[in-house]
Image: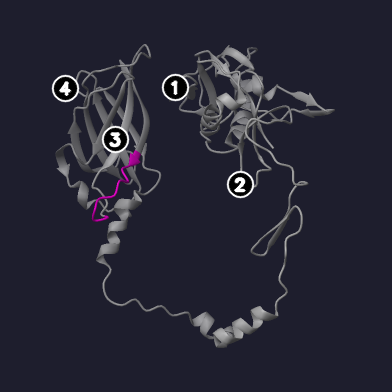
Amino acid sequence: MKKIITICAVLLMTASVFAQAPEKMSYQAVVRDGSNALVSSTAVGMQISILQGTSSGTAIYVETQTPTSNANGLVSLEIGSGTVVSGDFTTIDWANGPYFIKTETDPTGGTSYTITGTSQLLSVPYALHAKTAETVTGTITETDPVFGASVASGITGTDTTNWNNKQDQLVAGTNITIVGNTINATSGGSTLAIGDSYQGGIIFWLDATGQHGLIAATADQNTGIQWYNGTNRYTGTAGDGLYAGAMNTAMIVATQMADNQSGSFAAKVCADYSVTVGGVTYGDWYLPSKYELNLLYLQKIAVGGFASAYYWSSTEYDNNYAWSQAFNSGFQDGYNKFATFRVRAVRAF
């Protein structure tokens, strides 16, 4: 029995010289065997179907391809460029979703498909959907009856100029910013930077204000610990993106502790971590989301102390797998929750 772990399914957005949307989507998948070993440098047979409505809905387009996996078990293909079994990829109305991608795989390169997976296209392929604008013809007339009945409809350009000339002009003072109608005060003009020691850790990401962001602990909280607490189960922690790791961690700890297991696990060692600096204790640490873990990887030199090994994220793949990242290559992958990887806690400020 072999298992396929899908990494991504994204629309190919490269523009042509005529600015037309290409009639294909880029799709990648990683193939592993029953022992979780990569199926490397091997031709695999794949049948790809576009389903409409539900994950078991009507297949409006079907094609076959025979890609070859690379040394990392990764296969890459372009949906829309294979051997057509049925349907026409160029006539799919992407506005009439939802749509699902169903993949059937024969790891031996033939057509005896033994592996099946289905995932939803969670966003409309906008470059393809934008083709509908080509059908717009004639003159578009826009009316606004609400504004037409308002007293403001009689204001002229001269009236606006006279009004602006009468307004007091606001000038920002020290540590004050004015953007539109919003006035903000910065924290004493303090300057923060990536790599600074701050509130018990090292800053590895800052937002546009330069006053808020993410901090990593100064060392790993564990050098080899499992993601789960002895029982494979779905925790529902699919949250990704900035600050998503905090909610993920709380949900994982609550779910795993409900199993009444005595062992520790990745999210718990982060939630239990605390550090006191200048009489202030910071205890709101958590296991980073998949996205936050990648931000940490990108600043691993500025933060320091990382091993060339895999680190756990708090983002779950399914009941058996969770996302992790190799800090020697940056590669993100789903691994069995019983694998023992390193853990580095983060917190938001």
**Residue carrying label 4:** 110
Q: Nearer the viewer, mark 3 or mark 1?
A: 1
Viewer-side residue, 75 vs 272 = 75
Earlier-in-chain disc, 3 versus 2: 3
**Residue carrying label 2:** 208
> Which image quadrant: the C terminus?
top right
Earlier-in-chain disc, 1 versus 2: 2
Please, what is the three-letter code of the amino acid marked with disc 3?
Lys
Between marks 4 and 3, how big is the CA–CA gap?
A: 17 Å
**Residue carrying label 3:** 102
Quick check: marks 4 and 3 in contact, CB under 8 Å? no
Q: Identify the secondary structure beneath mark 2.
A: loop
Total number of numbered labels?
4
Please, what is the three-letter code of the amino acid marked with disc 2?
Ala
Q: Identify the secondary structure beneath mark 4.
A: loop
Between marks 3 and 2, how big is the CA–CA gap?
A: 40 Å
Earlier-in-chain disc, 1 versus 4: 4
Category of crowding for the residue at label 2, using alpha-carbon neighbours closer than 10 angstroms: few (below 14), some (14–19), many (at least 20): few
Residue 100 covered by magenta stretch: no
**Residue carrying label 1:** 329
Is residue 306 visible in the rendered image? The answer is yes
Q: Nearer the viewer, mark 3 or mark 2?
A: 2
